[in-house]
Amino acid sequence: MEEIIECVPNISEGRRKEVVEEIVKNLRSTGVKILDYSSDPDHNRSVITFVGDKETVKKGALQVARDAVRLIDLRKHHGTHPRMGAVDVIPFIPIKNTTMKDCIKISKEVGKQIAEELRVPVYLYAESATTPERKKLPNIRKGEFEGFFEKIKEPEWAPDFGERVVHPTAGVTAVGAREFLIAYNINLATTDLKIAKKIARSIRESSGGLQYIQAKGMELKEKNCVQVSMNILNYKKAPLYRVFEIVKMEAARYGVNIIESELIGLMPMKAALDSLAFYLQFPKLSADQIVETKIYE
Amino acid sequence: MEEIIECVPNISEGRRKEVVEEIVKNLRSTGVKILDYSSDPDHNRSVITFVGDKETVKKGALQVARDAVRLIDLRKHHGTHPRMGAVDVIPFIPIKNTTMKDCIKISKEVGKQIAEELRVPVYLYAESATTPERKKLPNIRKGEFEGFFEKIKEPEWAPDFGERVVHPTAGVTAVGAREFLIAYNINLATTDLKIAKKIARSIRESSGGLQYIQAKGMELKEKNCVQVSMNILNYKKAPLYRVFEIVKMEAARYGVNIIESELIGLMPMKAALDSLAFYLQFPKLSADQIVETKIYE
């Protein structure tokens, strides 16, 4: 039985194409299958999505960490997306014939290796977290790279692996196991950042909105608009259509239209079909009803 | 290179489960891959979807025809869906590494064999049609089983294969090659058949509506409602969302809501993602952005 684990490292480089290409090239040579990679120059961040079996994803994740630490200097890094490390976060996701437990084990092995080999302190997060405060990435990342030189000395912020010494150019890294997450952004037809921030606050869990939604308001200078940038941590409980319609509704109260949706990386077929079923009023729509899936399954 | 042709015979039996099961069982033994089959008791019709290479789909289609002719007696058949044959229509669709030309050739070989072996007159339709009047199935089917005993004697309605003698219990059959078609129905929250008929007229090509849409208004006694029953002959030119929104809009003028959409058989991934992209305002959404497709491709 083929085992498939997905890994989605986020690296703090979204502008220098040659750096991203080098990281991706070296990652490919480890034998993983790269499903997707995309860079955002405003965020100044890239997201790489790859899959493999346990041993291969471990090798791949370590290779990305090595290259990111070598090629990225956070002292010179600016972007709209918060970050604390050259390789900011490395999640492992069970996809097929593997369990969350397997992914937690892998995350700990990879985290330990990163701390020992690269001297980058590692925090375990999500399902791998060792304290409740470390479950949510934004909690760990608060203060960002620049703030971590102080934060790491606080009693409750000792890293899970490595010394209490922030890497001078590569910061600290979060590693963990989690369920599949959809990185989903909505661009608004306005340049007023306050509106994006208000909408983000109205929809996200941490401000009392929908559970399983993380959201931030951001400026997209290159596109001359603002964005509600979101993570959907559970697409079954917080389906895409509901997120979209709430953002649309909240935007309308400010007289603002939606320009477009943006998917960063990938989404599961089930997420796509559930939302289509909502709009077209299919009682249910499953991958079984898609001709290609049935042929190639 | 694996060649894939799809075949979707429609048989005039949607109530006697044991008959449908027997036909499907014998079809399976020919070596085709059955993707789907579904029966509608109101329509009194079943649609079977299977794929295979050229030789295998030919064998499969002939087997369905043999069994349908043997097991179905149109003299006792009643349903809301028009029909002219025990096996009413057999379309062949090029899916992968095959062309429309290949499918036209197959349709002619299968049509010839049905006429010779089963004594059922065959009309070539769609891309295989030998005259413009035979392109569209409803033109051929007009008059249905009962009317064909006269219609077959008309100068322009000589069958493409077989004598001018309607099979006494199995009628006549249409065989042809066509592009992928989506069989799509919308159920309305009313029992007023006139409304379904009016909406069907407003959307279908033959009454001046959207190109590539065939539509009929039908009564669904079992569900106690009416239905706009449609074929989308080109889902790229007439996308699902547009069909749905037009039907919804026309229904609203009569104060009627949509109960649900119904997909008969399968739809291509592209059709699903195009409509989702419309509603969620993705500039584009492709199979490449679905994690399962990327892993198993």
Image (cartoon, coloured by chain):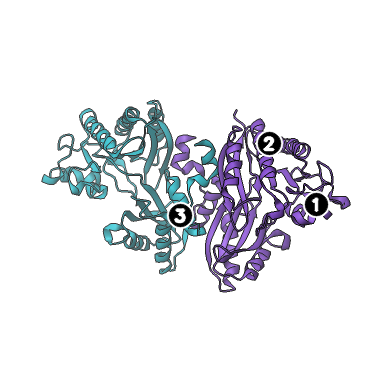
Chain colours: A cyan, B purple
Both on one chain, marks 1 and 2?
yes
The one of A80 and A121 positioned closer to us in this rendering:
A121
What residue appears at the point 46 percent right and 50 percent down from the top-left corner? A272
Q: Position of residue B284 (x, y in %)?
A: 52, 49
The amino acid type of the residue labelled 3 equals Ser
Q: For the residue carrying disc 1, how many other residues have a C-alpha within 10 Å: few (<14), some (14-19), or many (20+)?
A: some
Among the 4 quarters of the image, the one containing residue A126: top left
Q: Mark 2 points at which residue?
A: B99
In the foreground, B98 or B144: B144
Above or below residue A201? Residue B24 is above
Q: In this view, does A219 lie to the left or right of B155?
A: left
Check disc 1 and report the residue beneath it: B133
Q: What element carries label 1?
A: helix
What kind of element bears circle 3? helix
* Label 3 sits on residue: A275
Label 3 – label 2 distance at C-alpha: 33 Å
The residue under label 2 is which amino acid type? Thr
Q: Is residue A258 left or right of residue B219?
A: left
Residue B189, position in %: x, y?
54, 68
